[in-house]
Structure formats: structure tokens, C-alpha cells
Image (cartoon, rainbow, N blue to C red):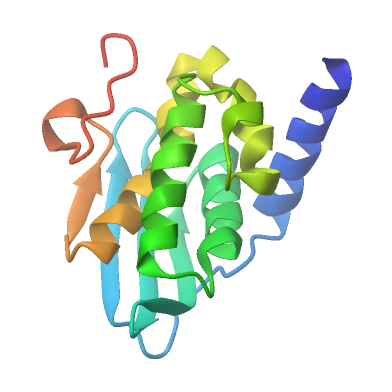
Amino acid sequence: MSNYKDLYQEVILDHNKKPRNYGQIEKATHQAAGHNPLCGDHLQIALELNQDLICAIGFSGESCAICKASASMMTVAVKNKTRADAEALIQEFLALAKGQLNAIDLIQIGRLAVFAGISQLPTRVKCAILPWHTLHAALNSGAETSTEAEHDPMRTTIGGA
């Protein structure tokens, strides 16, 4: 278990220090803004969708290390994937983050499995899932999303939040 926690910390620190796909993209066809009032995270996700293929994706904003690492890894995971594949991965990641599925049970999660233990930290779950909610909003022409229950289009509740 210690090795798994070490890997988690190493991956989070790496993606926080050197986020992949951070910044604006030139020909965004879809975009959305996400906000996590609990932590103060603000993200913008922009992507170029061409015939249902995510050709380019980028993110920007101010966020904690977990949120930034999640966004960085998410952009790597969905780039050059179809909208359907991205939506399936969104659902799988949310299930993983909420502790509803074990990393071994997941089909597409790959390196994102380092977030399997996040469900043990309820206050950090919303940090990890904000980029995924924002991607979902962007893919579905939503302008904004939030991790708060009344604004959460995917109705993700963590404990009483």
C-alpha cells in the first residue's frame, strides 16, 4: 500500500508541476468553465471536436494540485479519442473517484488508477472530479458546471456535500 501512495504522490506532483495540455487551444469548438466552491478551484476546458474526435484539448485556470493533476491526466487520456470514448471514461473515472468501482474492475482507466484512493479523502474527491465534470459540460454544450449538488449535472454527492 505504501508503494501505491508513493506513486499517487509522485504522479500528482509531476502533473501539478508540469501539467500537460495546459493553456488555450486555437480552434476550440467546445468549451466550459468549472468551479469547485469547496476548494476554490476554477477551470476552463476547451477542445476541438472534429467529426466526434477530440483533436485538441487544453485547460487553464487556478486550482489545487489534485485538480490540476486530474485535468492534466484527463486531457492526455481523452486526446484523439471519440466523444463516446471520452464520455465512457468520464463515467468510469467518476465511479473510481467515488469509490464505487475498484481500479481492477475498470476497463479504460489506465494510468488514472492512481486516483483510486481519492475516495478515502471525501473533501478532495470534488477536486479530482471537477475537470471531468467540466469536460462533460463542454462535450454537451454546457457553459458552466460546478461540483455542488444543485449545480452538478451528474448529481455527484459525496457524503453530505
Identify which residue, 66 or 77, lies in the foreground: 77
Residue 110: x, y in percent?
A: 67, 46
Picture layout, residue 17 above or below residue 117 = below
Residue at position x 45%, y 64% from top? 60
Which residue in the rendered view is the most extreme toward the bottom? 27
Which residue in the rendered view is the most extreme toward the right? 3
Picture layout, residue 71 above or below residue 91 = below
Which residue in the rendered view is the most extreme toward the left? 150
Residue 51: x, y in percent?
A: 33, 85
Identify which residue, 54 or 65, lies in the foreground: 54
Is there any visible trace of residue 111 in the rendered image?
A: yes
Instruction: Report the quarter where the N terminus lies.
Output: top right
The answer to which quarter of the image holds residue 85 is bottom left
Is there any visible trace of residue 131 in the rendered image?
A: no
Residue at position x 17%, y 66% from top? 141
The answer to which quarter of the image holds residue 49 is bottom left
Residue 64: x, y in percent?
A: 53, 40
Left or right position of 96 against 88: right
Number of numbered labels in the structure image? 0
The answer to which quarter of the image holds residue 117 is top right
Left or right position of 14 against 50: right
Residue 151: x, y in percent?
A: 14, 37
Residue at position x 37%, y 90% from top? 27
Instruction: Report the quarter where the C terminus lies.
Output: top left
